[in-house]
Image: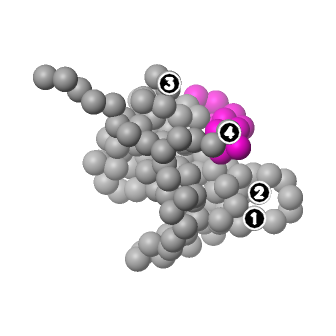
Amino acid sequence: MPTFAPTFAPVAATDLAVYRKAATACPGLPWTVLAAIGEVESSHGRLDRVSSAGAAGPMQFLPSTWAAYATDGDADGIVQVDDPADAASTAVRYLCANGGATRSQLATAIWNYNHSWPYVTRVLSVSAAMGAR
């Protein structure tokens, strides 16, 4: 039976640079996982919405998570949930705090990001497809 790679939106060069740079703050965390979360959550910010749970920004942070982990990813002195660099850096900080730098704990770190095993599977599938391109 043939297998099909998951589809995902093309990643703009500027977004790609943001994901790659942000991931360096957590050695061991693949940038493709960060980019896959950006794809699954908001198609890299193309789906600009606040979820029914109150999650916002391109990486879809709940207000409580944002308050605890918010990071100024572009060093402009302003931390904004809808700024791609801030959101990606905050996601890295959160994933790293939950074991994302360790391959054996990566799935659990992603699960902590969104408490759904199908979500984890989707993120890892998109990440693998991105890495293969």
**Residue 72: which numbered mark, if any?**
2
Q: CA distance from mark 1 to mark 4?
A: 22 Å
Number of residues whose C-alpha sits closer than 10 Å to that of mark 3, classed few (under 14), some (14–19) or many (20 or more) = few
Amino acid on which disc 1 is placed: Val
Residue 16 counted in the magenta span = yes
Look at mark 1 in the image and give the residue it sits on: 79
Amino acid on which disc 4 is placed: Ala
Looking at marks 2 and 1 on the same chain, the residue that comes earlier in the sequence is marked by 2
Is mark 2 in CB contact (under 8 Å) with mark 1? yes
Look at mark 3 in the image and give the residue it sits on: 133
Where does the magenta region start and end?
14-28
Residue 35, position as x, y percentages in the image: 54, 42
Q: CA distance from mark 4 to mark 2?
A: 20 Å
Is mark 2 in CB contact (under 8 Å) with mark 3? no
Point 40% across, 77% down: residue: 52
**Residue 114: which numbered mark, if any?**
none
